[in-house]
Image (spheres, grey):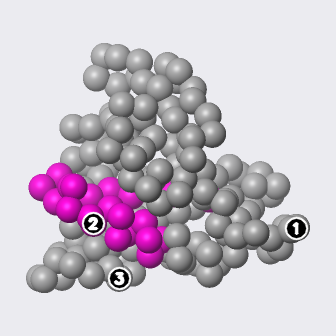
Amino acid sequence: MRIRDARPEDAAAIAAIYNDAVVHTTAVWNDDPVDVAEREAWAADRQATGLPVLVAVDDLDQAIGYASYGPWRPHDGYRHTVEHSVYVRGDQRGGGIGRALMEVLLARARKAGVHVMVAGIEAANTGSIALHERLGFAEVGRLPQVGAKFGRWLDLVFLQLTLDDAPAPGGGIPSSPRQENA
């Protein structure tokens, strides 16, 4: 497995990984799958503004996981904070791919001057929460019953990691329109 920047030809695999999460998990709180064109446009929009979209690929150069980050909120005051997403193909989970993607994503964020990275994780997703804690994230908030999927209420846990020790704000991440964080 290796990690590289996503290419347009990865859009089908990215869409399949995302749609599996939509249909089968509470990792994504959307009800409707997306098509390949939507994921291709999503990745292109992010990359055009300097934001990373990474893929983990197997020996055949097929995407088996992906990760990205984007603006946390649409207001200028949050320009030093990002929210990330990381997804791994269902048959590849638990093998270290998510951690490897996160390590590269964190390195990219630090290089870009990001100050804080936020993770929003469904409270019952203890595997993802544990992964983030192993990477240094700490729980900073919990919002009970703010989501719903599969006929039940979902609690949202926020974790965050401060990426630098900057005493004052610098430039922040590139400006871009409010985008979906997944």
In the image, taking residue 80 as reference, residue 14 lies left or right, namely left
Q: Is residue 112 visible?
A: yes
Whether label 3 touches label 1, CB < 8 Å: no
Residue at 59%, 72% (x, y): give it.
109
Q: Where is residue 57? Give x, y as percent.
A: 23, 76
Look at the image and tell me in which quarter the N terminus lies: bottom left
Q: Quadrant of residue 104?
A: bottom left
Residue kind at label 2, given as amino acid type: Ile
Q: Which mark is residue 97?
A: 2
In the image, taking residue 95 as reference, residue 52 lies left or right, namely right
Helix, strand, or loop for circle 1?
A: loop
Q: Which residues are magenta?
A: 82-105
Q: Is residue 44 visible?
A: no
Q: Where is residue 117? Give x, y as percent.
A: 60, 58
Density class for disc 2 (Cα within 10 Å; few <14, some 14-19, many ≥20) is many
Look at mark 3 in the image and give the residue it sits on.
Answer: 4
Look at mark 1 in the image and give the residue it sits on.
Answer: 168
Cα separation, mark 3 vs mark 2, equals 13 Å
Residue kind at label 1, given as amino acid type: Ala
Q: Quadrant of residue 12?
A: bottom left
Q: Nearer the viewer, residue 169 or 48?
A: 169
Please tell me which of labels 3 and 1 falls first in the chain.
3
